[in-house]
Image: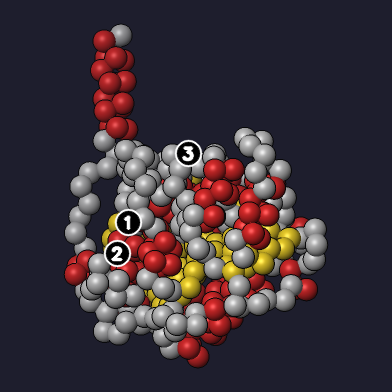
Amino acid sequence: MKKCVWALALLLWMTGCATPAPNPSPSDDLRPARKAKNVILLIGDGMGLTQISAGLYSNNNKLELERFPVVGLHKSYAANSLITDSAAGATAFACGVKTYNGAIAVDTDTNSVRTILEEAEARGLATGLVATSTIVHATPASFIAHVKSRQMYEDIAAEFLQTEIDFFVGGGKKYFDRRETDDRNIYQELEAKGYVMSDYFQKDFDKVKIDATKNFGYLTADADPLPYRQGRKYLKPASEMAIEFLEEHDAADKGYFLMIEGAQIDWGGHANDSDYIITEMLDFNQVIGAVMDYAEKDGETLVIVTADHETGGYAINPGSRMGRIEAGFTSDYHTAAMIPVFAYGPGAELFAGIYENTAIHTKMRRALNFERNQ
Ligand code: MG
Ligand code: ZN
């Protein structure tokens, strides 16, 4: 009996102390050879090394990620758990702080921490978010809103009025215009603020015309957008439109920050559905290809591809062959495996090595030369 109590106490102590002080990494002090004008951060939610491998072997042994010259690994854990969620994971990238699971751009004391998107906006860069989840879901939310819990979707929607984000595409229209917590219509408030707003009720995404002199928002679904295999098609065209828009919108020629999320790789992992993972992975792969085509021509854009965490404890088991994955799963939640980081363009060299997930924030700021004039 006593032994059980001690074992329990030890277990509680261990889970409470999941986060020792981070180790310094050799890449922490690197300076970029050349400043990046633009940063495009692509987050494949739940995209661990196995998700990438399964996409590769299901796609004739080819992935756009093979075009990246620099590969690193990040440690994905959160402040209060070795197993991060997407809120703490995205907050690490957006704000450079380890926080608790569920936190949206707030620290462990629930104080707001400025995001790289907000800082980019304040410095005169153009900004954008594109996601295949709702736009108020944890990953995109952590770049624009500050709330103590990721479930506060309507509060997150209202915070789109606080930051002058220039371009956003994602689902979740009901959190803007049919709210349960108040009678506000954030969709109309954004229009009143000068946004050109549109949604899937009015027109398909491919019929939308952009006016780069205004800000732009398009809501792709009432709640969660469909999976790719059920007909969702907008991630690639929306990402290409975002780049074109931000280039034009950036009248002062200061550059832009764009985050693009392949959100549903994670949902395939939670569902322990290998086909769902692979189809989302290959949709995301096409977007990576389009972004790389642009960045290679542009020459001033730093492209980073990573994930917040792995989902599913996904494994490619014996019996698999090229084009046919025999999948195994150890969990219907996230795991703590280190996560690959792929970088291309000015400042890409900063992303080699092994480092904390929060270092991605520091490295992006350094590449953009934000550190020089604080
Ligand atoms: Mg996400
Ligand atoms: Zn998840």
Looking at the image, do the residues carrying marks 2 and 1 touch, with CB atoms under 8 Å apart? yes
Looking at the image, do the residues carrying marks 3 and 2 touch, with CB atoms under 8 Å apart? no
Residue 64: image quadrant is: bottom right
Please name the residue that numbered disc 3 is placed on.
149
**The residue carrying mark 2 has its beta carbon less than 8 Å from ligand 1:** no
Q: Quadrant of the C terminus?
A: bottom left
Please name the residue that numbered disc 2 is placed on.
362
Please name the residue that numbered disc 1 is placed on.
96
> CA–CA distance between discs 2 and 1?
7 Å
Determine crowd level at label 3: few under 14, some 14-19, many 20+ residues with C-alpha closer than 10 A.
some
Determine crowd level at label 2: few under 14, some 14-19, many 20+ residues with C-alpha closer than 10 A.
many
Q: Amino acid at mark 2?
A: Thr
Q: Quadrant of the N terminus?
A: top left
Determine crowd level at label 1: few under 14, some 14-19, many 20+ residues with C-alpha closer than 10 A.
many
**In the rendered image, is residue 350 in sight?**
no
Q: Amino acid at mark 3?
A: Ser
Looking at the image, do the residues carrying marks 1 and 3 touch, with CB atoms under 8 Å apart? no
> CA–CA distance between discs 1 and 3?
18 Å
Residue 36: image quadrant is: bottom left
- Name the residue rendered at 44%, 47% in the picture: 146
Q: Along the horizontal axis of the image, is 80 left or right of 243? A: left
